[in-house]
Amino acid sequence: MKKLLCTVLSTVLAISSAAALNMSAYADSANTQQVSYNYWYNSSTGYTDENVHTRQMEKLDRGLIAIKTDGGVYLSWRLFDSEDNIFGSADKNVSFNVYRDGKKISEVATKTNYVDSTVGTNYSVAPVINGVEGEKCDAVTVYNNSYFDIPLSKPDDETIYDPSGNELATYSFFPADCSTGDVDGDGEYEIIVKWTSSERDVGSPGDPAYSGTVHLAAYKLDGTKLWKNDIELGKNVYSSAHTVQFLIYDFDGDGKSEVMCQTSLGSKDGQGKYVSNAAQTDEEIKAITDEENSTADYRGYGRITEGKEFLTVFNGETGVAMDTINLPTTRGSENGVDYGDDFGNRSNRFVSDIAYLDGEKPYAIYLRGYYFGRNGKQRTSIAGISWDGTALSPTYRFDTQKGQEGYYDGAYQYVGNGNHNCTVADVDNDGKDEFITGALCMEVNDDNEFRPKWCTYLQHGDALHIGNYDPTHTGFEFFTVHEDSGTNSLSGNDITLDFGMSVIDAETGNIMFHEGASDDTGRGVMADVGASGYYQIWSAKNSARQSNGGTDFTTATSLTGRNTPSMNFRIFWDGDLYDNLLDGANITDWNGRNMSNIFSAGNYDCVSINGTKANPSLQADLFGDWREEVVYPTTNGMALRVFSTTDTTDYKIKTLMQDPVYRSGVAAEQTAYNQPPHVGFYMGKEVFDTRTLTSIAVTTQPT
Ligand code: CA
Ligand code: CA
Ligand code: CA
Ligand code: CA
């Protein structure tokens, strides 16, 4: 333990100097900031300074929230990466002066929440470093509840006609997945909501198979609606969780998040203009007339298997389309048959996330196609697309199909290895993000090629999680469940598949633990709920296991049988360092015997979304301290209700949004079968037990 303390201490001192040497920037903006990360924690070596990387990310405000509770007023605010001397780049401890109605009431040194037993009108906080007070944040008023509402403007009901003009049905819109970014650069997150009226599964769309349409709309947390009109994707973009992927991120580094989404003929931006008009470099797209936009109908008998497919970047503040290009991950041959069928199922399977592929700037990753086909064909196409403020560029390409951009001899062996979700992390600690979708991990290699880093060939699955839970194993543990059985021989070796669940070393692709099952293993979680071991894994077809470090997994008897925990999201809600679990509208906590309910959005007239997948619209560290907020639609779909915990915590941790793995996880939440974001750094209690000593030692260093 002593060695660990020394290592942590010296590391904290070293982080800021290493960070200064390793600065990266892709645009010069006052609205961005450098953020550090060090995921290479190991129980014997602690953190070491050469493993620190930095990157440019969005700049956030203090995020102070004040909520009236039985005990007075609960206050909670952000710690920045630059103020965190354990997980961030700070070399000094930061405390905070707390102000009620302009008068200082406390100095808080060890946490970023505070309960004022007197109920004031407004509150603000200011950081204090070495006795010097920094900038006080704007004063906030007190919420009467642990939630606030964003009232929504629901789109009008829509009547769906088939291509011959026969009326099929009339549908009402309901808020679905949300995502977040700071679209106006004021340091506060906005919420982008996806509206669906009749969303279909491209695999089993029902009859008739015509979907409703999709709208996107943006709101500030105070309820202000941005954009003149909703972005309307129109009838030529199929409304399916597998198809519509929308990414919110500051791609060009100007401090304001953009919106990126697939579009087609008929898609309109936030000013009501067809997105094809916004094409900057593609003259053919730019030449498309309004007449062609308004009349084009690619729906055939329902699912879309033909016609134009675009990718559009929108200004997040105004909704204005800024560039439109042909979707780099092409449908290819007629009806998308190269993906495995001719009826628009396998060719309409997408996932997306954000990755700093080159270590310098964020790329939108769009993956298309992850199944083996029913017609003897299969294809996976992946693009890494940048936006520089002027044009979209599909810089990085990978394709398993000969003749397609990104194909190379040997690429075909990687077909069929994608999940209904994806995750991003710098798994080999070289400063560049990798992109993992199920059985396949992609990287930009030393030759600047976008290539598989590893592949387990275990094919397709429905759930995945990444984390840094095991301090005896350097780097990330990656968990996934499997839908396939049989043998995959495309690598040249016979790989046996038997469903079940696996923990995989995210750097090497080596399987640390695998347990088969008798059937499609459709759900699974990796989390540390505090029960036993470093962390626990369980699935719909496998009993819970606990990790005892490395490849040592034993049955977690306390989590089996009647006590089997939910299998959906993990979340930080209460004040300890363990994961809570979220399923539907409920959050549960390990109480020493089983998981017990500690929050139910259903008690506040809210519902979960996505049917049996039962997610919140959004889970993210939107404001306040490092605990996560959840957003659910109200039962009538007329508002988003944003919930905050009011539990206090003794732990002082930087905002999770300045942790790159977590931030990419939030960006990916909207994708297909939603998965929760995970934190990239190791959060074991022993790291914090060194804090007091570290803080004292560091602040007495000569400056
Ligand atoms: Ca904002
Ligand atoms: Ca931007
Ligand atoms: Ca890497
Ligand atoms: Ca929070």
Image: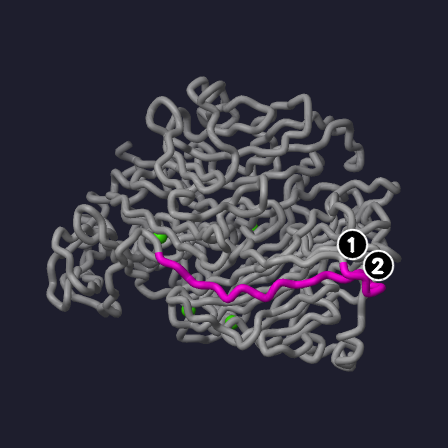
Is residue 306 something that shows in the picture?
A: yes
The answer to whether 45 is drawn above or below residue 545 in the figure is below
The answer to whether 307 is drawn above or below residue 415 in the figure is below
Amino acid identity at mark 2: Gly
Residue at x 36%, y 43% (from the top left corner): 573
Residue at x 58%, y 74% (from the top left corner): 270
Residue 434: give x, y in percent of width and height: 58, 50
Give, as a single range, the part of the protein colored magenta: 148-167
* Viewer-side residue, 396 vs 143: 143
Residue at x 64%, y 68% (from the top left corner): 232
Residue 286: give x, y in percent of width and height: 74, 80
The answer to whether 615 is drawn above or below residue 265 in the figure is above
Residue with the mark numbered 1: 303
Residue with the mark numbered 2: 300
Judged left or right of residue 612, residue 141 is left
Q: How many marks?
A: 2
Is residue 57 something that shows in the picture?
A: no
Residue 405: give x, y in percent of width and height: 78, 60
Tell me the tag on residue 543. none
Q: Is the residue under label 1 in contact with that under label 2 (CB below 8 Å)?
A: yes
Amino acid identity at mark 1: Arg
Judged left or right of residue 640, residue 110 is left
Task: Say which quarter of the image contains residue 163.
Answer: bottom right
Judged left or right of residue 102, residue 364 is right
Q: Name the secondary structure under disc 2.
A: loop
Q: Is mark 1 within 8 Å of ligand 2?
A: no
